[in-house]
Image (cartoon, grey):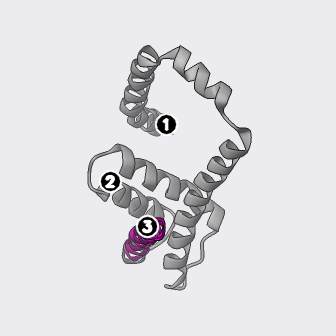
Amino acid sequence: MPRRRLTSLLRWLPGTAILAGLAVFALRKVEWAHFSEIVQRAEPAWLVAAVLMQLGTYLCAAATLQRGIKASGVSRNLFGLVPLGLAKLFVDQVVPTGGLGGTVLVVRALERRGVKRGVATAAVVVNTLAFYASYAVAVGGTLAGLWLRH
């Protein structure tokens, strides 16, 4: 058991080191005066709205995974899938693999949760299609709004 724990910790080491390096780099490049000005101008209601919308994104990603899994007769808790939705979106944004990194991550995580590989893959495909469909709807709405305002 201790060896397994050490192996698990060592797997996190490269990512943690990269994150720490990025944090150090970002903190050196921050223009603190400009940041302070932005914070002073911030309106709390808009920040709360932004946080709630971001949380909604992760909840919707988890919900599409849940619906994809449930279609095969397997039931999983929605809130147990939220970390997978967050992880997929994070990996897809941070790692330049065209969405494959997050997909592989979620499929393997679902397999560890007892979901068959085919079902997990289908759920992730549905999740990806829903993600791109939502972007299409947002672009369509934006274009319609621009067209109405000339």
Alpha carbons under labels 2 and 1: distance apart? 24 Å
- Considering every residue shown, the one lying at the far right of the view is 45
| Magenta-highlighted residues | 122-150
Sequence order check: which comes first, mark 3 or mark 1?
1
Taking 53 as reference, is 86 left or right?
left
Q: Which residue is mark 2?
A: 101
Q: Residue at x 42, y 69 (%)?
A: 147
| Magenta segment main secondary structure | helix
Percent of width and height locating residue 19? 42, 29
Alpha carbons under labels 2 and 3: distance apart? 15 Å
Mark 2, residues whose alpha carbon is within 10 Å: few (<14), some, or many (≥20)?
some
Q: Residue at x 51, y 40 (%)?
A: 1
Alpha carbons under labels 3 and 1: distance apart? 35 Å
Q: Is residue 38 above or below residue 57?
A: above
Describe the element under mark 3 as helix, strand or loop: helix
> In the rendered structure, which amino acid carries the disc numbered 3?
Phe
Q: Residue at x 55, y 59 (%)?
A: 57
Q: Nearer the viewer, residue 95 or 134?
A: 134
Q: Which residue is mark 1?
A: 5
Q: Where residue 110 is drawn, which disc sits there?
A: none
Describe the element under mark 1 as helix, strand or loop: helix
Tell me the quarter of the image containing the C terminus: bottom left
Q: Which residue is mark 3?
A: 131
Q: Nearer the viewer, residue 137 or 145?
A: 145
Residue 35's image quarter? top right
Describe the element under mark 2 as helix, strand or loop: helix
Percent of width and height locating residue 121? 37, 72
